[in-house]
Amino acid sequence: MDMDALSVIRTKRDQGRLSDEQIDWVIDAYTRGVVADEQMSALAMAILLNGMDRAEIARWTAAMIASGERMDFSLLPRPTADKHSTGGVGDKITLPLAPLVAACGAAVPQLSGRGLGHTGGTLDKLESIPGWRAQLSNDEMMRVLRGVGAVVCAAGEGLAPADKKLYALRDVTGTVEAIPLIASSIMSKKIAEGTGALVLDVKVGSGAFMKNLDDARELARTMVGLGTDHGVKTVALLTGMSTPLGLTAGNALEVREAVEVLAGGGPADVVELMLALAREMLDAAGLTDTDPAKALAGGSAMDVWRRMIAAQGGDPDAPLPVAREQHTVTASASGVLRELDAYAVGVAAWRLGAGRARKEDSVQPGAGVELHTRPGEMVAKGQPLLTLHTDTPERFAYALQALESGITIAPRDMVSVYEAHPIVLDRIA
Ligand code: URA
């Protein structure tokens, strides 16, 4: 087969369809290092601008799966169920959800990622727990899954290696927000992972990669179709991401909040979404007679969390890292907090050090943003709205810039105009 990267890039640049042979070749050649990062960046940008049809996406996903190994959980005594979020601000749901669903009888093999753009990553969050290791061998992963029922770890080197390279490249080349690339990235990992049931949390709003419901539905339908075609029982919930989830965005800050939820407290939106996703996972796994709310209230989810963290070298009792410096943002006027924009908060957390600017950067475990109020609440002039956390105070000004247009306070008599949105906006199966 006579192929070269330039002709593949030109096909997509000129709004053509990539052939099966072109897709198979470019994914394989990129994985082997024959196609260079700069060539793949150009192709990713051409895909972002010109799209791919369903057949191209299916082939691209199959090629990414074929770039590595496939796991097999069929010998486990419990049905497997996994959840994947398309990425949001303050989205710490995996942390309490995985132990909760395991406490209800499913095996939860939660292969997770790192931060992408302004959105946080589950592995970055858990790595703020002293001693916790994201990297497990396949054997170790199976052992934790058998012994504890839930494991949250990095996908092994062998699983969809094409996605591993492409994901890191997209993060730093402005090519994240493309439906074909997001759908194939998520589904190649989940199908190769071998879960029997999968619940997708497709985020919608300013803090998500999908800014409106139509795009989110298109992404959800594409992913549900890919999963179903590969024999994975796949369901998607579309959930709001116009304001951060919960009251924290940033690695250790979010772990603290997740532990509060497992202890029976925590913000109502986090608890509500976690329970909705848990019910979908249990349903898709065929475990319909267990109530996750009871497992949460009875403390069994917290027990699984503690064992899950300890099984990966973490100390569930160790104090979490705290950033060296704090800065409080106060209300500029009295009134009702109309908007606390998720994207603005995500960018601020990222600029404070919770995310990375280059793929080789490390993150600050204590950095991030803590919310003291939620949209819809009354505030008085001078009242603290947010606390910014970082080890590097020279970042405060840059983070504050991100927040400038993200906070809106309306006059008190506008309070009846504020409309709270439900968290779950739609379901696609
Ligand atoms: N999560 C992924 O795994 N991949 C994406 O492209 C976006 C979110």
Image: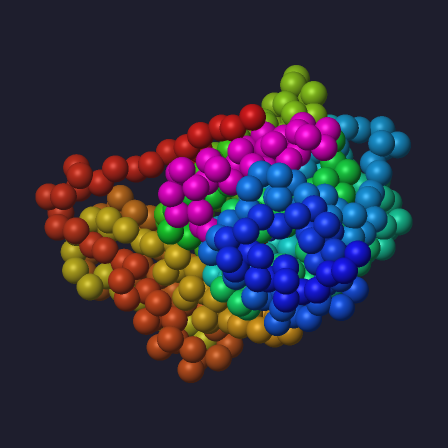
Residue 241 pos. (x, y %): 42, 46
Quick check: 228 above or below 99? above
- Examine the image and state in which quarter residue 351 appears: bottom left
* Residue 301 in the figure: left or right of residue 273: right
Q: Residue at x 85, y 32 (%)?
A: 74
Q: Quadrant of the C terminus?
A: top right
* Residue 119 in the figure: left or right of residue 304: left
Q: Residue at x 41, y 66 (%)?
A: 348
> Among all residues in the image, which is located at the extreme front?
2
Q: How many marks?
A: 0
Quick check: 202 above or below 113? above
Is residue 32 among what the camera can see? Answer: yes
Q: Decide which of 35, 322 is in the foreground and name it.
A: 35
> Among all residues in the image, which is located at the extreme bottom?
394
> Among all residues in the image, which is located at the extreme top?
289
Q: Decide which of 194, 329 is in the foreground and name it.
A: 194
Q: Is residue 415 magenta?
A: no
Residue 79 pos. (x, y %): 77, 28
Q: Is residue 219 magenta?
A: yes
Q: Quadrant of the N terminus?
A: bottom right
Quick check: 274 above or below 20? above
Instruction: Please name the colour scheme applied to the rendered image.
Output: rainbow
Quick check: 174 above or below 281? below
Q: Residue at x 45, y 75 (%)?
A: 325
Q: Residue at x 26, y 44 (%)?
A: 376
Residue 166 pos. (x, y %): 65, 60
Is residue 321 among what the camera can see? Answer: no
* Residue 180 in the figure: left or right of residue 335: right
Residue 228 pos. (x, y %): 66, 29
Q: Which residues are magenta?
A: 208-236
* Residue 150 in the figure: left or right of residue 381: right
